[in-house]
Image (tube, grey):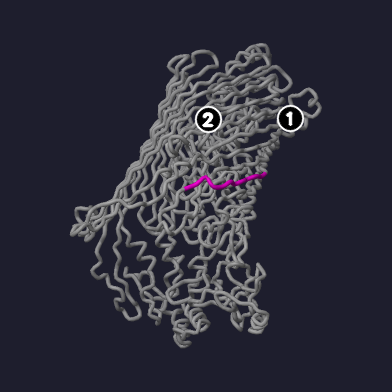
Amino acid sequence: MKYFYKRFLKLGSILFLSWLCVANVMAQSQTISGKVTDAENGEGLPGVTVQVKGTTTGTVTDVDGNYSLSVPNTSGVLVVSFVGYVVQEVPINNRTSISVQLEPDVEQLDAVVVVGYGTQKKQNVTGAVSSVDFDDKAMTSRATTNVSTMLSGLSSGIRVQQSSGIPRDNAESNISIRGIGSLNASQSPLVLVDGMVADINTVSPHDVASVSILKDAASAAIYGSRASNGVILITTKSGKNSGGKVNFNYNNFVGFRKPTIMHDVISNTADHMQLINIAQINSGVNPSFTEEQIAEWREKSQTDPIGYPNTDWSDVLIKQNVVTNHNFSARGGNEKVNFYTSLDYFKDDGLITNTGFRRMNFRNNLTYQVNDWLKLGNNFTVITSKAEPTQIANIFTWWRATTPGMVPKHPDGRYGAAQTPSGEAGANNLLMQAESIRGEHKSNNLQGKIFATITPLKGWEITGSYFADIRNQENWIGGDPQERWNFQTESIVIPKGDVRLQLTETFNRNQREIIDIFSSFNRSFGKHAVGVLGGFNQEYFFQRGFSASKRDLLSWDVPVLDAAPSDPQASGNASDFAMRSFFGRLNYAFSNKYLFEANARYDGSSRFAPDRRWGFFPSVSAGWVVSEENFFGGLRNTVSSLKLRASYGQLGNNGIGNYEWQEFYGTANYALGDRIAPGLLYGAFGNDQITWESTNVLNVGLDAILFESLSVDVNYYEKNTNNILANLPIPQVNGGIAAPRFNSAEVMNKGVETEVRYYKTIGKLGVSLGANFAYNKNEIVSYKGDFIEGRGASQAWTEGYPIGTYWVREVETIVQNQSQIDELIAQGYTFHPSAPGPGDFLYRDANGDKVINDDDRVLKGNPIPLITYGGSIGLNYAGFDFNMIIDGVGKWDKYLQGDLYGTNRITIGYLWPEAYKGMWTEENPSTTLPKMYTNNPKNNMTSDFFLHSAAFTRIRSMQLGYTLPNSLLSKARLQNLRVFGNLENYFTFTDWPGQDPETDDITYPLSKTVSFGLSVGF
């Protein structure tokens, strides 16, 4: 868009200035020449005005950004200006060659934002819309290829939680906009790439031009039933009219990764044995290890690591990880045809064996202006990926069930078993389990969109498009476990034996088709500006899959089902859904001061019964540009722009299963006489009365620009989601049949968002700063279930509290002597599951009934962050640039228990946190850790001992780059050359005691990356 605007102004600039150049040719003049380029990408800027300050002498740059100008003397000052860039004044200082780099003017470039089915001037936007510019050297140089994680810290109200670091297309990034509004239905925003539903994780960041985040009803209601959780609009790069010249760009980085934060578990085997002994004595069990055995291991492990290992499983599993990315693109066009083509290759070796990933993206965006009333185009993408097969979920489930007293793998290639004298030889060898998996996961994705735009009259456009998205996934996987050795005795402890090799193959095909037809009309009549849009959308999605497995595979050298003759099994499934929609928008502006907009969408979804599948989702909004009023004139030197806006509307959500309004039956076999007959089994109740979740959103906002360099956006919102779809409990007499969904709850989110941006050029130093802050309060307003436990026993859903509030006992103190408990028993107190003793937790009697049990559990903590924040810093000086992005959350709590952090299974064949060596003993009574047991649950009850703050601040990206000057590049016929180094996710500040606070308790770790790269344009 920026380039088209430059070309539009070029002709006018040339006509205006051509007579100036002629009129000022004087005797004894001096000729100055040079080139004006974009400071961000090094491209020459055509149509730039170069003028001698205080005179009418000037010229404009040619199509490549070159200029030549005769000046009356060489002691003056050149003024270099162009729409969308910061004006520069350059002293001539007797020079004959002067080249200038213009910095983009952030506020002017932000003048147009992408909205649903079109664009709008930012000054005319009455909804809550945030924009992130991806067509930026700092963004495309980051060591990540996941667009969702790149949004972290750059916009208020959006939170991206990367719950797993496994390198996959389907990497687990949970995106939420303005909190969580549903209990069970989809909580993710609608993601559209060039107007089409797509997976945000498969888009190459190099192909992205901008991202718009629609947060309120005014901006999102045009998408109706799918917009209750917000909308993310991704616009990819397009071609540009470069006079037939093609610009090529190559971008590359190589990075080295390691985990951000890992579990700190005991790796000293002697300490491990000692802790087991203490827990066994606490439990009234004879200790497994003698003091002599512990002392022997402690001594001999110093000189014989094979016979007496101290294994740190984090070091064993986590390997040196290299990540690489290559991107090549071509961009250009003329008055008829514009194109953008790119090829992107990404490879991640994975932090853990057998988790490598490769992906290749090809994109071609093409437009063809057939004549002055018809434009044709296509967006075409091919995405292929291949991933190694390890079943990561199992590996990290097995993480705790092992011991440091095991050699993972002998230098000669043999795998080890536990060597401690305790009978735990069967403990998991995690490295063997990771390396013994065979298989691969492949995905092939074809996306294509063709469109045509007709312009019958000035201001009137009719657009039709067809989009198809076809994804095929095929996997084969199996295990090949190996024998395991005790290297003290040089004997096989666990033989390979007669392991029956099993091969499993799966295939899935997903196909989505979308038709859009819409028409828009935009005209101005004096002080009146009117815009009207109306359209139709039809979508169909189909999925089919099957899985087959057989045993006794002859060899992994032939991984096909025909090579496995035994125990064949097969299963298959299919599913589909459809939507049909009608939508419209009306815009009106008077004198660029008074703004009005109305949006509406009428959606029908096959996920509801025929008489309940249609929903209507309207919104209205208005704005007042106060700074355009006459009375504001005296303030414009300070406040150059001020707009007040408000909106109210309704959005919807149908993010449930495709057939939940219908009863569900599964297949089952039964005995009929002397034979087995196929039959049907009742699987789930249906509910044909369920209908749309609806979200009513009120938004009040303010946009201001101060001192022509500081922009401030503020929003207050209230978002109430009604008719929430949730599974309510049903009587067990139904035999365990799955409960149907009901429209059963109401959830409120309300909060405040602020975004501040500052841009200033101080001499040769360019400064850009950004900061954002959001506060969101989540609350269940009403719930027919009244009180239901949520995920696990530690969370609950109930009215007046956030979704998933923690439901825990409160630890009052750690008992130091028996007299404390004897006194309470004398007062009539009883305890469940048993009375505490010295070193045990004393839980608070919250309800005052003198019976300390689960009835004393209370609701506490913040399961959904109250605060999110972020910021950015950009500095440019003499070719050097420095960029940093920060984000974080505050007032956020998580529950850390699980197998690894439990206090009641301190026994043979398991790992525990290093911190647990500081547990309560008579010699160590001043501690926050209780007495540990092998099988006693009393210190492992659901309690606030396991509830911790997960607040964190993370430096997402820190980057230093250098762009070579044009004087060096011109000799090599290069447009730009930039080298850079980047730190991604490298610094995290948190008090969370477990793995990285963004992830689940035990999962594939997030990574931090050191990378180096270059960007070349030619």
Report whether residue 592 is seen. Answer: yes
**Which comes before the other along the chain, label 1 or label 2?**
2
Inspect the image, locate mark 1, and give the three-letter code of the amino acid beneath it: Ser
| Residue displayed at 60% across by 50% down | 780
> Does 162 sit left or right of 86 as displayed?
left
Q: Main secondary structure of the magenta part?
A: strand
Residue 303 lies, with reference to residue 800, above or below; the image says: below
Residue 392 lies, with reference to residue 23, above or below; the image says: below
Q: Position of residue 216 (x, y in %)?
A: 60, 37
Q: Residues within 10 Å of mark 1 (few under 14, many from 20)?
A: some
Mark carried by residue 601: 2
| Residue displayed at 51% across by 70% down | 902
Residue 865 on the magenta span = no
**Residue 111 lies in quadrant:** top right
Inspect the image, locate mark 2, and give the three-letter code of the amino acid beneath it: Arg
Asked whether 339 or 458 is in front, the reply is 458
Residue 743 on the magenta span = yes
Asked whether 1004 or 954 is in front, the reply is 1004
- Per the image, label 2 sits on a secondary structure element best described as strand
Residue 978 lies, with reference to residue 337, above or below; the image says: below
> Does 349 sit left or right of 455 as displayed?
left
Question: Which residue range is magenta in the image?
Answer: 741-751
- Per the image, label 1 sits on a secondary structure element best described as strand
Q: Quadrant of the N terminus?
A: top right
Mark carried by residue 640: 1
